[in-house]
Image (cartoon, helix red, strand yellow):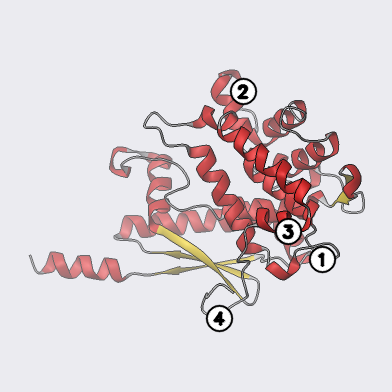
Amino acid sequence: MVANRGQRIEGTKNIRDSIKENAPELYSRADQLWKKAAGGIHELQAKPNGFQQSTSHALAVERNLSRLIPDDWRGEGRPMRPIDLFVLSVSACLHDAGRGVQAQYPHFAYEDHGRLSMCYIRKLAEEYGLTRGQATAVGWVVSAHNTGNLDQLPPEDELTAVSNYGGVNVRKLASIFKLADMLHTDETRTFHGDADELHGVARQKALARRTITGWYLKDDNTICITASPRDGEEMQAVYDSFNYMRENELQPIATMLRLHDFPHKLEISVDIEDIRDRIEFEQNQ
C-alpha cells in the first residue's frame, strides 16, 4: 500500500512487473520494445543539453498508470488483464512518437500528434515486435491522448482483437491512459530552462510545472493535485493550469472513467507557506 493519507489504495507495482508475473511472453515483448524506442524514436525528442524528454515522460506516464491501477485489479479475470496492461505500457512508450515525426518532418507540425503516433505505430508494428492486432489496439489508445476525443474510437461493445489474447476495450484503456498522461504535469514533464527567460504561454506553463509538486488519490475517486507556489504569479499560473486540466483534459474522459470506477474528479491543494516565508523575509530586510 502506498502511504497516502489513508485514501484510496494506489498501485504499488509497476505494470510491467505485473505483466511479467502473469504473461512472460508479453513482458518480454514490451521490455524489448521499450529498449528499442529509447535508442530510436525517443532520440528525436532529445534536447540540445542532452535531456531525453521522450523517455523521461514515457516512463513517468507508465508510473502514473501503475499508481492509478490497484494491484488487486490486475490479472486474468480481473478488471485489468495482462493484455490490457501490455497495451497501456506500450502506449506509454510510443504515445508521443508523433512528436518525433514532427521533429523529423516539419510539414507535419500542425497535425494532431496523437493521430500521427497511431499511424507511426501501425506502420512500424513489425519493427517494434507487435502483432497487427496489438498495434491496432495501441494505435487507438494513443490516438486520443492529445484531444481526449473517445468518440473517434471503436464503441465499447466492439472489442479490438489482440491476437490470441482476445479483445480489449480501447475506450476504457484510452481514458485511463489520457488521465495518466495528464497527471505528469510537474517540472519533469519537459525541459523549460529558466522560466524568467520565457514569455507568454511558455512562461505560464513553466511556472505552473515548477510549482506543482505531485498528486495523490482520495477515497471518493478524486485526484488531488498538490502545489507550492512561491509568489502570486506562480499561484495564478498553477490555478490557470489546474482549471485547464479540469475543463479541457479531464472533462472529455470523465464519464468513461466513472463508468469503470477509475478516479474521475480533480481538486487542488495549495501550500502557501513559501509565500508567507518570502513575505516575512522581505519585510525583515
Q: Is residue 273 left or right of residue 124?
A: left
Mark 2 or 1, closer to the camera: 1
**In the rendered structure, which disc, 1 or 3, sits on the residue that comes first in sequence?**
3
- Element type where label 4 sits in the image: loop
Mark 2 or 3, closer to the camera: 3
- Element type where label 2 sits in the image: helix
Q: Which quadrant would the N terminus be assigned to in this image? A: bottom right
In the image, residue 86 above or below residue 281: above
Type of the residue with mark 4: Gly
Q: Residue at x 35, y 38 (%)?
A: 199
Can you identify the residue that label 1 sits on? Answer: 78
Can you identify the residue that label 4 sits on? Answer: 6
Alpha-carbon distance for marks 2 and 4? 46 Å
Type of the residue with mark 1: Arg
In this figure, what is the number of numbered marks? 4
**In the rendered structure, which disc, 2 or 3, sits on the residue that comes first in sequence?**
3
Type of the residue with mark 3: Glu
x and y percentages locating residue 19 in the rendered image: 73, 54
Q: Which mark is residue 108?
A: 2
Q: Residue at x 28, y 66 (%)?
A: 274
Q: Are marks 2 and 3 in contact (CB under 8 Å)?
A: no
**In the rendered structure, which disc, 1 or 4, sits on the residue that comes first in sequence?**
4
Type of the residue with mark 2: Phe
Going by the picture, which residue comes out furthest to the bottom? 6
Can you identify the residue that label 3 sits on? Answer: 21
**In the rendered structure, which disc, 2 or 4, sits on the residue that comes first in sequence?**
4
Mark 1 or 3, closer to the camera: 3
